[in-house]
Amino acid sequence: MEIITDAKMRELLKVYFILGSTNCTQDPLEVMHQAIEGGITLFQYREKGTGALLGEDKYKLAQAIQKLCQQHQIPFIVNDDVDLALSLNADGVHIGQEDESAAAVREKIGNKILGVSVHTREQAYEAIQQGADYLGLGPVFSTTTKEDAKAAAGTALIQTLRKEGLTIPLVGIGGITAENAPLVMAAGADGVSVITAISLADSVIHSTQKLCQAVYG
Ligand code: TZP
Ligand code: MG
């Protein structure tokens, strides 16, 4: 497997859906079916928070979602858990600043996709230098989904990095909806990544379609 090109990565980041069992009230596989039908372009399995699955249960759900993603050519990324990503032969890993260094994860995963969450320009430059394929910036807007989320940062850092000439694929996260997604794109992001705007929507298909329209303009 070749390392992903920036152009391909940008395409995948457009409507990046993140889900774990604690983020939905219905069957996560049903949510996935509808989100895929609605048009998501990339998926991250993020099993976190109070009541999160562990061990075999986590593995089984990840495997079932991965299978569904594979059937629809949606790349499947694992949050934090490099061992899980390797044992499933996932398409990539997403890490934050509290996790192992990007360089260490790159060593372990070879050419799989590597995403890194950053909150400052220094962290952004470091992640790029250590081999990140894309950056996640947020929370852009306020969110209650991530228990330890920082305060909403707006789109300033996205704009700053673009003004400085950084061309790395970049996605906004945190409190993003179809209504505010155009602001994130206008700031210079390649896409939006969302949890609850899709996972807790009354109609998952409809909300995903609306988000796609907002992103593609
Ligand atoms: N990282 C920063 S904010 C966030 C993560 C994982 C949660 C995003 O969830 P939502 O429901 O889209 O605000
Ligand atoms: Mg993490």
Image: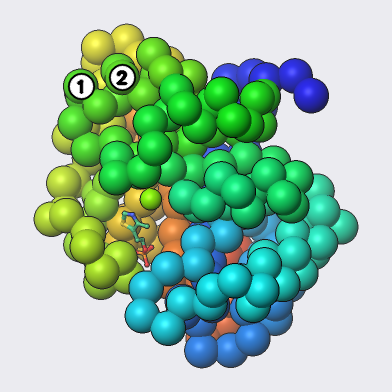
Residue found farthest to the left: 151
As rendered, which of 79 and 41 lies closer to the eye?
79
Question: Is any atom of residue 74 visible in this view?
Answer: no
Q: Which residue is mark 1?
A: 122
Q: Position of residue 179 (x, y in %)?
A: 36, 61
Q: Amino acid at mark 1?
A: Glu
Q: The N terminus lies in which quarter of the figure?
A: top right
Q: Amino acid at mark 2?
A: Glu
Residue 214 as seen in the image, left or right of residue 30: left
Separation of residues labelled 1 and 2 (CA atoms): 6 Å
Which structural element holds mark 2? helix
Q: Residues within 10 Å of mark 1 (few under 14, many from 20)?
A: few
Q: Position of residue 51 (x, y in %)?
A: 42, 83
Q: Which residue is mark 2?
A: 126
Residue found farthest to the top: 165
As rendered, which of 10 and 56 lies closer to the eye?
56
Q: Position of residue 52 (x, y in %)?
A: 46, 77
Which residue is pictured at 30% across the width and 25% down the height? 124
Q: Is mark 1 within 8 Å of ligand 1?
A: no
